Image (spheres, rainbow, N blue to C red):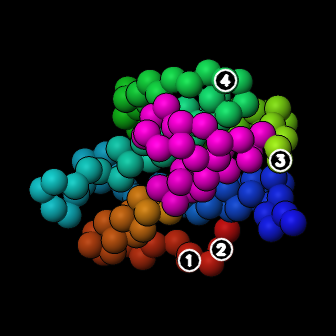
Amino acid sequence: MVVLSKEGLLNILEGNRRLTLRVVEAFPEKELFHYTPAGKLRPFAEMVKEVMNIETGYMRGIALGIWEFPDSFAVISTKEELVSACEAIRDETRKLWEEMTEETLGVVEKDPFFGPSQSHFDRLQYALENEIHHRGQGYIYLRTLGIEPPEFFVR
């Protein structure tokens, strides 16, 4: 019995990305790249770059068997570049998505980036949870800046 189809998962990923981009857009540009409410935290832009690196690494690994985890977005320094990169990565994900089957998502392998064996579906679930976690941090950052974050329920 399939509880969540491949297309259902993509729809969830898409809705979450739209919301993450709305959070990015809510930030003033300087604060997006430099603001943290406490010393050891990263600026929200750095978290978004991590989300994109994980998406790129997992999607290319699952669809093409190319397991690389480069920091492809380190040089991004403007909101426009960040939004554009997010959209480009998601476009690539949509293309690679066509290369995968639901059976592919069920394949269990050792994770080349983070260690334990898991299914490709579980990897994508981790990537989604990581994005949600960091987006939640973005909401807090916005509130500490006195900015009302986007409505959570609008995807």
Real-space CA distance between mark 4 and mark 3, rounded to the nearest whole angstrom: 16 Å
From the viewer's perspective, tell me whether residue 6 is left or right of residue 81: right
Please tell me which of labels 4 and 1 falls first in the chain: 4
Residue type of the residue flagged with mark 2? Val
From the viewer's perspective, tell me whether residue 103 is left or right of residue 26: right
- Label 3, secondary structure: give it: helix
Between marks 4 and 1 in the image, the one whose residue lies nearer the viewer? 4
Please tell me which of labels 4 and 3 falls first in the chain: 4
Real-space CA distance between mark 3 and mark 2, rounded to the nearest whole angstrom: 28 Å
Magenta range = 104-130
From the viewer's perspective, tell me whether residue 69 is left or right of residue 106: left
Q: Is residue 113 magenta?
A: yes
Residue 7 in view of the camera: yes
Q: Is residue 25 above or below residue 3?
A: above
From the viewer's perspective, tell me whether residue 50 is left or right of residue 95: left
Q: Is residue 80 above or below residue 35?
A: above
Residue at which label 1 appears: 151
- Residue 43 placed where, x, y %? 29, 50
Residue at which label 2 appears: 154
Circle 1 residues within 10 Å: few <14, some 14–19, many ≥20: few
Residue type of the residue flagged with mark 3? Glu
Q: Is residue 23 magenta?
A: no
- Label 1, secondary structure: give it: loop
Between marks 3 and 2 in the image, the one whose residue lies nearer the viewer? 3
